[in-house]
Image: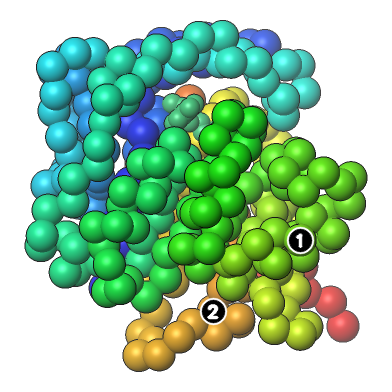
């Protein structure tokens, strides 16, 4: 069972209080695809310019990410740059050049439509997210969408429409409060469920994530794996959702997923996201081994279980 990830592939410049790097592989779909591929076959649907470095293409291939849905168009690859504040939690966007992303209309090859069981609509304009659902039809078992403050502000109507077409919405705490106009995250989660999706995940950065379901009693909350040092949290949310989807796809479930499958996936996604924070770009994530992951998962289980 495979995961299709549609979203941005970018060249990022990231500045932290201690370090700065440019021309980094970034983009919502890049992180999500590499994270998903740790657990399951994953396919990327995205656009890049002719300037996109071959070394990044090789990296996707090394991670077994299917690239039949990666489109090359004339122009330059999407570029984003951001600077983190001293706390490494909040950041300012310094520059955005949409470039080839501006005119992008996602096109999904027929073989990917047929093989997709979980669709991840990684952060992108809601119009692009709708276009992916239009092409996938009813074949997918679960459709997950991520969003960001920008779309809540400038494309709210299309985002609201999207909520009626997806199974799971994921967004961060600030975005959930902004979107539902409340300071209470539990209220925000329940209000978002009323807008359409069967499930909602609210990410809380270094404080973990909360999962809300529509059925009575469906609520789960977990912390994040405690990290001693964060080098660059860019893409942590994207890695979270990629790991979440990849883990779910690896489960052998003929029918719908149980709520307990989703809670297990939240923890896997959270652990994977931690590795993204431990280096710039995808460097730690791409090098993650099964042994390292299993050890951290076991350590986390010990930290979160009590009598
Ligand atoms: P996150 O840290 O999870 O918010 O994701 C950061 C990644 O999102 C970076 O690698 C950026 O290239 C990418 N990104 C930033 N702004 C946008 C946007 N407007 N649309 C799509 N991707 C974006």
Q: Is residue 39 visible?
A: no
Assess disc 2: are there few (<14), some (14-19) or many (≥20) residues with their C-alpha within 10 Å of its C-alpha: some
User: Residue at point 65% right, 62% down?
Assistant: 195
The residue drawn where x is 36% and y is 34% is 8
- Residue picked out by circle 1: 191
The one nearer the camera, 133 or 67, is: 133
Under circle 2, the secondary element is helix
In the displayed structure, 243 sits above or below 156; it is below
| Most foreground residue, 108 or 131 | 131
In which image quadrant can residue 270 be found? bottom right
Vertical placement of residue 240 versus 189, above or below: above
- Indicate left or right for 86 with 233 as reference: right
**Where does the C terminus fall, quadrant-wise?**
bottom right
Q: Is residue 163 visible?
A: yes
Specify the quadrant that holds the N terminus: bottom left
Q: Residue furthest bottom?
A: 254
């Amino acid at each position: 069972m495979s995961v299709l990830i549609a979203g941005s592939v970018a060249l990022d410049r990231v500045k932290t209080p201690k370090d700065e790097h440019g021309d980094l592989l970034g983009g919502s779909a890049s992180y999500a695809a590499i994270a998903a591929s740790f657990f399951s076959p994953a396919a990327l649907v995205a656009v890049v310019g002719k300037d996109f470095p071959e070394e990044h293409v090789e990296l996707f291939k090394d991670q077994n990410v299917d690239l039949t849905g990666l489109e090359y168009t004339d122009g330059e690859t999407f570029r984003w740059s951001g600077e983190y504040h001293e706390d490494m939690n909040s950041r300012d966007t310094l520059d955005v050049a949409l470039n080839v992303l501006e005119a992008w209309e996602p096109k999904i090859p027929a073989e990917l439509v047929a093989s997709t069981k979980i669709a991840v609509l990684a952060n992108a304009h809601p119009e692009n997210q709708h276009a992916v659902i239009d092409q996938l039809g009813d074949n997918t078992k679960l459709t997950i969408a991520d969003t960001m403050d920008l779309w809540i502000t400038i494309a709210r109507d299309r985002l609201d429409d999207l909520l009626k077409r997806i199974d799971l919405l994921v967004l961060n705490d600030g975005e959930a409060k902004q979107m539902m106009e409340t300071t209470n995250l539990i209220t925000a989660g329940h209000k978002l469920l009323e807008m359409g999706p069967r499930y909602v995940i609210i990410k809380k950065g270094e404080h973990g994530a909360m999962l809300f379901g529509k059925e009575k009693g469906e609520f789960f909350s977990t912390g994040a794996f405690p990290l001693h040092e964060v080098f660059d949290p860019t893409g942590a949310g994207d890695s979270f959702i990629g790991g979440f989807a990849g883990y779910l796809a690896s489960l052998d479930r003929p029918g719908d997923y149980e709520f307990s499958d989703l809670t297990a996936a939240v923890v896997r996604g959270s652990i994977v996201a931690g590795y993204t924070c431990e280096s710039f770009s995808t460097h730690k994530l791409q090098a993650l081994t099964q042994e390292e992951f299993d050890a951290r998962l076991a350590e986390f289980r010990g930290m979160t279980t009590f009598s």
